[in-house]
Image (spheres, grey):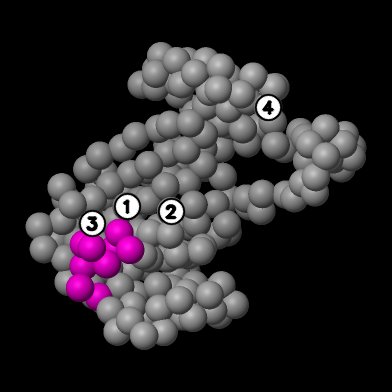
Amino acid sequence: MRRFLSQGERALEIGPGSGVYIPVLKDLCAQVCVSDCEHAYLEAIETLYCDDPAVRTVVDDITNSKLNDESFDLVLCTEVVEHIADSSAAMRNIARVMKPSGILVLSTPQRYSSLEVVARVALSRELLWLTRLFYREPVLELGHINLMTARELQVQMSAAGLRIVEQYKGGLYLPLVAELLGVTGQRIAAWLEQRIRGTPCDGILWTQYYVVRRTR
């Protein structure tokens, strides 16, 4: 992110999860705002950073955001839009709160990645019992209600007034290879990923990543 951020005053992270990216954002920007639509998801971060004036939390729904226009030099939205039904509205609000020179770093799973396709089968009502028996532990649904192809996501970003500066796809899941072959399986997947990336088949890679700026 540092390559694209000449001077960072304020950063926004949407949907921070456990807050693993907050130290990185603090290193890049003087102030970090962390937002989520549910306060419960912010409580652990509030406890961890209660004595840090550089970090603040806010309950905010990015699809109907109340954050001020052109407020942030950097917006981070990673593994979030797949949980938002109206991602078009989210993109419009992200563009609105970014400063004209600001950047957005965004990632989300691909709709037809091998992992997502296998998960839909393995977590189906008919096969969930077998999946739990195989893993010998509780297996929960991923909660992905809005999986998009790269084309679908790029259309939404363009319509919101955002342009892609850099993009990347990565992560290859191979059923049973990942579960049974350990380090060898990881090496096989990494070798295949390198050969798939950039080809018409790269829609099976798990995650799409973007660095984005405003067009206006």
Amino acid bearing label 4: Glu
The stretch drawn in magenta includes residue 29: yes
Which label was assigned to residue 179?
Answer: 4
Amino acid bearing label 2: Thr
Residue at mark 2 to residue at mark 3: CA–CA distance: 14 Å
Does 173 sit above or below residue 214? Answer: above
Residue at mark 4 to residue at mark 1: CA–CA distance: 31 Å
Q: Which residue matches tag 3?
A: 103
Marks 2 and 3 in Cβ contact (< 8 Å): no
Give the label, 2 or 3, closer to the camera.
Answer: 2
Q: Residues within 10 Å of mark 2 (few under 14, many from 20)?
A: many
Marks 3 and 1 in Cβ contact (< 8 Å): yes
The answer to which image quadrant residue 31 occupies is bottom left
Quarter of the image with the C terminus is: bottom left
Q: Earlier in the sequence, mark 4 or mark 1?
A: 1
The foreground one among 100 and 40 is: 40
Main SS category, magenta section: helix
Q: Earlier in the sequence, mark 2 or mark 4?
A: 2
Magenta residues, start to end: 23-31
Give the label, 4 or 1, closer to the camera.
Answer: 4
Residue at mark 4 to residue at mark 3: CA–CA distance: 37 Å
Q: Residues within 10 Å of mark 3 (few under 14, many from 20)?
A: many
The answer to whether residue 98 is visible is no
Q: Which residue matches tag 1?
A: 105
